[in-house]
């Protein structure tokens, strides 16, 4: 099984390491044609506006929407969460608009307010060390299920073949969330 990491900007190598730790083959996705080679994709953290501009420049917007429409799993982390959300609070801008959620950008403060906390994540872990860096949060989940909250804010959710976290699971050495995503990909292959 091959799982891609959108390799335009962000923590690409870290996600690839975690995919390998979770038992799948990782592929750095730099060209639209590579989407045909993979069964699932991670859209990493980074800077959502920069990633969106690069997705537009290299033709990934329609290609990723088509990928998701084929029920191939998509996992957005931090900026990736913003990119897959159907609504972004305070703006009419939508990037991919895949996941039926509304998000708030930079909800936990600026870079210097970054922090780590142990989270209980439904069906995944009772004690996952979550790394928050200029993190968004999910204001509303219109469809799907909430997997984790922090300070009454939704920080992880799933909607069928779509998974999102406000934090960076790739910045730990704990592959449990990536294993969960690998299992999602297997589930949608059959």
Image (spheres, rainbow, N blue to C red):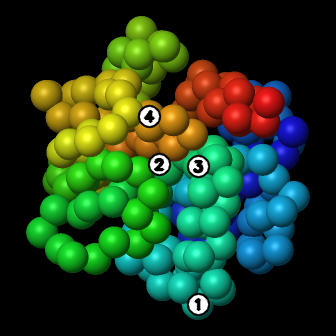
Say which quadrant the C terminus sits in.
top right
Tag 3 residue: 74
Inter-mark Cα distance, 3 to 4: 10 Å
Q: Which mark is residue 113?
A: none
Secondary element under disc 1, as helix, strand or loop, is helix
Q: Nearer the viewer, mark 3 or mark 2?
A: 3
Secondary element under disc 3, as helix, strand or loop, is strand
The answer to which of marks 1 and 3 sits earlier in the sequence is: 1
Identify the image quadrant of residue 183.
top right
Whether the residues at callouts 3 and 2 have beta carbons within 8 Å, the answer is no
**Callout 4: few (<14), some (14-19), or many (20+) C-alpha neighbours within 10 Å?**
some
**Between 87 and 8, the one nearer to me in the picture:** 87
Inter-mark Cα distance, 1 to 3: 20 Å
Res 110 visible = no
Establish if 98 lies above or below 159: below
**Between 98 and 125, the one nearer to me in the picture:** 98
Q: Which mark is residue 57?
A: 1
Whether the residues at callouts 4 and 2 have beta carbons within 8 Å, the answer is no
Q: Residue at x 56, y 28 (%)?
A: 177
Inter-mark Cα distance, 2 to 1: 21 Å
Res 31 visible = yes
The answer to which of marks 3 and 4 sits earlier in the sequence is: 3
Q: Nearer the viewer, mark 2 or mark 1?
A: 1
Secondary element under disc 2, as helix, strand or loop, is strand
Q: Which mark is residue 158?
A: 4
Say which quadrant the N terminus sits in.
top right
Q: Residue at x 18, y 45 (%)?
A: 139
The answer to which of marks 4 and 1 sits earlier in the sequence is: 1
Q: Which mark is residue 77?
A: 2
Q: Is residue 91 left or right of residue 170?
A: left
Inter-mark Cα distance, 4 to 1: 28 Å
């Amino acid at each position: 099984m091959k799982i891609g990491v959108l390799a335009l900007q962000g923590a690409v190598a870290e996600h690839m390491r975690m995919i390998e730790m979770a038992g799948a083959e990782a592929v750095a996705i730099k060209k639209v044609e590579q989407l045909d080679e993979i069964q699932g994709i991670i859209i990493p953290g980074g800077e959502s506006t920069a990633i969106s501009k690069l997705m537009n420049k290299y033709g990934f917007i329609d290609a990723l929407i088509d990928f998701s429409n084929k029920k191939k799993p998509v996992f957005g982390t931090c900026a990736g969460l913003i990119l897959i959300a159907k609504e972004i609070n305070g703006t009419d801008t939508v990037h991919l608009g895949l996941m039926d959620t509304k998000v708030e950008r930079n909800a936990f403060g600026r870079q210097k307010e970054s922090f780590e906390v142990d989270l209980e994540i439904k069906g995944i872990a009772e004690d996952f060390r979550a790394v928050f860096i200029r993190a968004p949060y999910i204001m509303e989940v219109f469809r799907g299920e909430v997997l984790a909250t922090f300070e009454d804010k939704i920080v992880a959710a799933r909607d069928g073949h779509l998974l999102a976290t406000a934090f960076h699971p790739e910045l730990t050495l704990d592959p449990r969330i990536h294993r969960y995503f690998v299992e999602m990909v297997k589930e949608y292959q059959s």
